[in-house]
Image (tube, coloured by chain):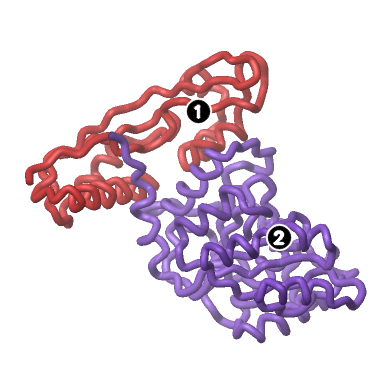
Amino acid sequence: MTMEPRTSVIEKRLKNIKRIIAVASGKGGVGKSLVASSLALHLAHKGHRVGLLDLDLYGPSSHIILGVANVSPTEKQGIIPPIIHGISFMSIVYFTEEKPSPFRGVDISNIILELLAITQWGTLDFLIIDMPPGIGDETLDVIRYMKTSEFLVVTTPSKVAMGAVGKLLKILIEMNKPLLGVIENMTMKDSLYIQEEVGKLRVRYLGNIRFDDNLEDAIGKTDCLIKTQAMKNLATILQKINL
Amino acid sequence: MHEWALAESVVLAAVEAAQKEKLKTITQITVQIGELQQIEKEIFLFALQELAKFQKPPIKNNAFLLKTEKSSLSCKTCGKSWKYSDMKKKFNETESESIHFIPEVVFVHARCPYCGSPDFEINKGRGVVLSSIKGVR
């Protein structure tokens, strides 16, 4: 007999976190990391105690958006994430040094288990998870080990993106996961396409973030990021779900 | 003291298993420690013993038996196998520390020593596993 001990401690590690919100999408490149980082910043600015966990293990990018550099977790009865711009921030990047990360599925699950077992978040109002695209190991592990997680789903106005996002929504509905709704990101022209597609699945369409020419220049500079039109659009959307 | 967090998971898992088996006392907990995780055994044992004091069912003094599992890694490209200890000297302190926290980052900081492929796997000796529990009903 052998037993995996790490699963037993995860509930304890998460017990002082009031809400866990996973920012997810069926498709890559739709702006999940930007929404997740901006959501974390938004909540921290409102005075909440916020954590951000980047679970995009192949291509972590929240640290780039938040301009995180030259920091590392503290070791104390586990690892304590450093607080950056008011956010307790945890990412695989502390251990990979921006090198390529060739992980297979079993390794992904092991990394997630390890991170969840050893990270000491303390007391948080919100833990935001920047999810990788799709419905693979990371999504299934979050559903399995972070049972209270709610999902905030991001898409672009593209039919291609919505095709994959629809599949994620269907599996989340099938697994009875709480869905906060869908955000349409990078909207360039007015269209009801995403709103209608989301409506067909009886999921709440929360609104759109218009394509923002100035956003790229604000990456890595949180003081600029919070002033962007995209961030203002996001704040309006978040009001609808009391965030 | 990252060892503390792992010790906590071992004690909680052992207690859960003992409760399921309706044990009144836990007399032995065997823990297998994978070579890759480079656990400080003394710290780990200290943490296990401290955490064991407050449990139900009670855990007997000196119940913990720690066994090191030697590692075995093998390349999916050339098929050759090796041990972590064979390659350890090539890691700097930061890389070694990172592997201690998350053993899978060995795939980030190392390549197959024979063909240089990044596509290899850990067959044995990854991390901490609870291998057996004994007790009295």
| Local crowd size for mark 1, using a 10 Å CA cut-off: few (<14), some (14–19), many (≥20) | many
The one nearer the camera, A168 or B77, is: A168
Residue A116 drawn at (x, y percent): 46, 54
The C terminus of chain A: image quadrant:
bottom right
Q: Mark 2 lies on which chain?
A: A
User: Image check: A110 left or right of A231?
Assistant: left
Classify mark 2: helix, strand or loop. Answer: loop
The one nearer the camera, A52 or A174, is: A174
Residue A99 drawn at (x, y percent): 68, 39
Are marks 2 and 1 in one subunit? no
User: Image check: A83 left or right of B100?
Assistant: right
Q: Answer above or below: position of A57 versus A66.
A: above
- Residue at the location (34% across, 33% down)? B33
Amino acid type at circle 2 is: Gly
Q: Which chain is red?
A: B
Q: Mark 2 points at which residue?
A: A67
Picture quadrant of residue A223: bottom right
- Residue at the location (13% across, 51% down)? B22
Residue at the outermost front position: A200
- Residue at the location (45% across, 63% down)? A147
Q: Name the residue under label 1.
A: B122
Residue A223, label in figure = none
Q: How far apart are marks 2 and 1 (CA)?
A: 34 Å
| Local crowd size for mark 2, using a 10 Å CA cut-off: few (<14), some (14–19), many (≥20) | some
The one nearer the camera, A196 or A39, is: A196
Residue B99 drawn at (x, y percent): 51, 36
Residue A172 drawn at (x, y percent): 58, 63
- Residue at the location (28% across, 28% down)? B67
User: Image check: B90 left or right of A236?
Assistant: left
Query: Which of the two discs, 2 and 1, sits closer to the camera?
Result: 1
